[in-house]
Image: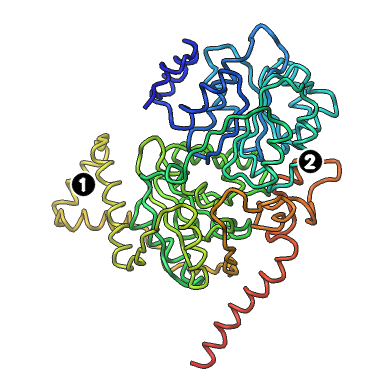
């Protein structure tokens, strides 16, 4: 492994990296940083969780002239969450260098961003729609930009941003340095690189490095109606420190969030229909350990960098097999181990095999925990809390009363009563979730040229599709990003919602028919 000291970085940047607790570069950083510092255009193929933000963020910081107040670097990201995350990380990496960084994105008042731009940031991180708003208003001028980065280019393609990206790139001087990062390289991305990059160097991280070997991957075969009770049993038996549960649609996330709280779990949901403030509050609670479970859609969770996530539960199989890698990459970070469990119905078995084909990694089959195992798990959690209180001391106010009770009752019985009192007993709360149709399996070719064009895929997934042919629920004068970052009327994309509702209805009526026959 290469250390950051060996990459020829400035003392300020090395110190900032050290302050963040990093010593050795990841494979994408080791390969990308030297090429970027030499001024090459780069095509980087890497997933979230591989350290690619620092791979392009460090060269960006090194190349900024802090005496020049003009915008010198532009980074484009598909979602507001990712734009914020990238801005935070680059801000930390440049904390000793005097570099000014600003994220701009839809969902935040543009007037607030215009005021922030008066502080003359040298690095702008933004979503394409909001960047175009600023360019048209002339509040962002790009004539001095010498470095451009596209982060998760395939995601921007999927969300319908290609035309915006091309428009923005034509506004930037041609002698710039351009870095493209994408998990996959579909034809439309290749065309963009051929049009806008000059003799690019290719850096690719193989799939075996993408799936992170220290994540245990499991699947559970079950019926749709079993999913919620099984999830609760897993939360009880696994006792995760921090867990993320992924749902396919916004409706699913809302229903799961409500159901988990009714069962006594500290949960919060995030998806594209929530305001930025609501999402920020949820993420702050999650990072500070005030929540046990974060329930999220793929788009809302994109780019989230939360340390300490021990478990990921795919309540719904991801629509796009490549999203699976992004999801499980939320755990097993910084050398720590993690666990990912995927719920698979009988009609989704082929889809699971497609995911395994993509990741080159078999999932291990896991049995559904029994109710006895779940109860034991709850009791262990209660015992851990009890021991933690004892070890924390400060029990003086309670000891006299404890002595009195011990004169009348057996100590073992008293501890057992305390554990019973502290054990969650909400499993009898009846929960009804709306049925979701199974994922339709799409066979994939294992090469980089499979067609994943934005317009063709605009109708895929609960939130992730492009904005073509879908209804926007926001104000007419709102930011373009509002339309493209997930705020739509329907959880399901146009052309698929009727099929989805029909399947869900069929599932429900099928259950009724079975009961009648019995």
Q: Is residue 15 above or below residue 476?
A: above
* Left or right of 468 in this view: 335: left
* Left or right of 427 in this view: 465: right
Residue mark closest to the camera, 2 vs 1:
2
Q: Residue furthest front?
A: 199
Q: Which residue is mark 1?
A: 402
Q: In the rendered image, is residue 124 in sight?
A: no
Q: Residue at x 44, y 48 (%)?
A: 243
Residue 163 x, y percent position in the rendering: 79, 41
Q: Which mark is residue 277?
A: none
SS for tag 2? helix
Q: Which residue is mark 2?
A: 163
**Circles 2, 1 touching at the beta carbon (< 8 Å):** no
SS for tag 1? helix
* Left or right of 169 in this view: 19: left
Whole-number angstrom distance, CA of label 2 to CA of label 1: 71 Å
**Foreground residue among 78 and 27:** 27
Q: Is residue 374 above or below residue 18?
A: below
Q: In the rendered image, is residue 199 in sight?
A: yes
* Left or right of 112 in this view: 97: left
- Considering only order in the chain, which callout, 1 or 2, is on the residue closer to the N terminus? 2
- When asked about the image quadrant of residue 37, the answer is top right
**Foreground residue among 178 and 95:** 178
Residue 267 x, y percent position in the rendering: 50, 50
- When asked about the image quadrant of residue 199, the answer is top right
**Foreground residue among 153 and 297:** 153
Dot 2, how many residues are within 10 Å of its Cα: few (below 14), some (14-19), or many (20+)? few
**Foreground residue among 38 and 300:** 38
Q: Residue at x 52, y 87 (%)?
A: 514
Q: Is residue 493 above or below residue 454?
A: below
Residue 462 x, y percent position in the rendering: 65, 57
Q: Residue at x 22, y 57 (%)?
A: 416
């Amino acid at each position: 492994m290469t250390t950051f000291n060996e990459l020829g970085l400035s003392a300020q940047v090395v110190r900032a990296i050290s302050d963040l607790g990093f010593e050795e570069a990841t494979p994408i950083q080791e390969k990308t940083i030297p090429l970027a510092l030499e001024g090459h255009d780069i095509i980087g193929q890497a997933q979230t969780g591989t350290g690619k933000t620092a791979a392009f963020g460090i060269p960006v910081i090194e190349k900024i002239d802090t005496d020049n107040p003009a915008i010198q670097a532009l980074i484009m990201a598909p979602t507001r969450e990712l734009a914020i995350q990238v801005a935070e990380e680059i801000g930390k990496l440049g904390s000793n260098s005097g570099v000014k960084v600003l994220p701009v994105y839809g969902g935040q008042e543009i007037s607030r961003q215009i005021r922030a731009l008066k502080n003359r940031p040298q690095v702008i991180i933004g979503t394409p729609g909001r960047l175009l708003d600023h360019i048209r208003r002339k509040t962002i001028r790009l004539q001095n930009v010498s470095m451009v980065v596209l982060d998760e280019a395939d995601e921007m393609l999927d969300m319908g941003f290609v035309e915006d990206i091309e428009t923005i790139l034509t506004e930037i001087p041609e002698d710039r340095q351009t870095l493209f990062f994408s998990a996959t390289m579909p034809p439309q991305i290749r065309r963009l690189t051929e049009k806008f990059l000059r003799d690019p160097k290719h850096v690719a991280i193989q799939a075996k490095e993408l799936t992170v070997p220290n994540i245990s991957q499991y699947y559970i075969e079950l019926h749709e109606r079993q999913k919620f009770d099984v999830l609760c049993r897993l939360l009880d038996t696994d006792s995760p420190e921090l867990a993320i549960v992924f749902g396919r649609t916004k409706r699913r996330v809302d229903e799961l969030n409500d159901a988990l709280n009714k069962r006594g779990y500290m949960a919060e949901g995030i998806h594209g229909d929530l305001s930025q403030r609501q999402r920020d509050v949820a993420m702050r609670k999650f990072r500070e350990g005030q929540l046990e479970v974060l329930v999220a859609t793929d788009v809302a969770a994109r780019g989230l960098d939360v340390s300490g996530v021990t478990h990921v539960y795919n309540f719904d199989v991801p629509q796009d097999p490549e999203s699976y890698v992004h999801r499980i990459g939320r755990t097993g970070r910084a050398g720590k181990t993690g666990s990912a469990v995927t719920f698979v119905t009988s009609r989704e078995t082929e889809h699971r095999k497609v995911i395994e084909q993509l990741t080159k990694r078999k999932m291990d089959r896991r049995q559904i925990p029994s109710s006895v195992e779940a109860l034991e798990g709850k009791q262990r959690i209660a015992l851990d809390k009890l021991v933690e209180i004892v070890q924390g001391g400060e029990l003086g106010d309670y000891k006299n009363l404890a002595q009195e009770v011990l004169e009348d009752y057996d100590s073992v019985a008293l501890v057992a009563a305390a554990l019973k009192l502290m054990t969650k007993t909400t499993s009898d709360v009846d929960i009804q979730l709306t049925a979701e149709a199974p994922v339709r399996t799409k066979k994939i070719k294992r090469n980089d040229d499979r067609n994943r064009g934005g317009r063709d895929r605009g109708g895929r997934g609960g939130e992730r599709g492009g904005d073509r042919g879908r209804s926007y629920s926001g104000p007419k004068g709102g930011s373009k990003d509002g339309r493209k970052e997930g705020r739509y009327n329907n959880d399901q994309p146009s052309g698929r919602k009727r099929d989805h509702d029909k399947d869900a209805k069929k599932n429900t009526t099928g259950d009724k028919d079975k009961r009648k026959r019995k």
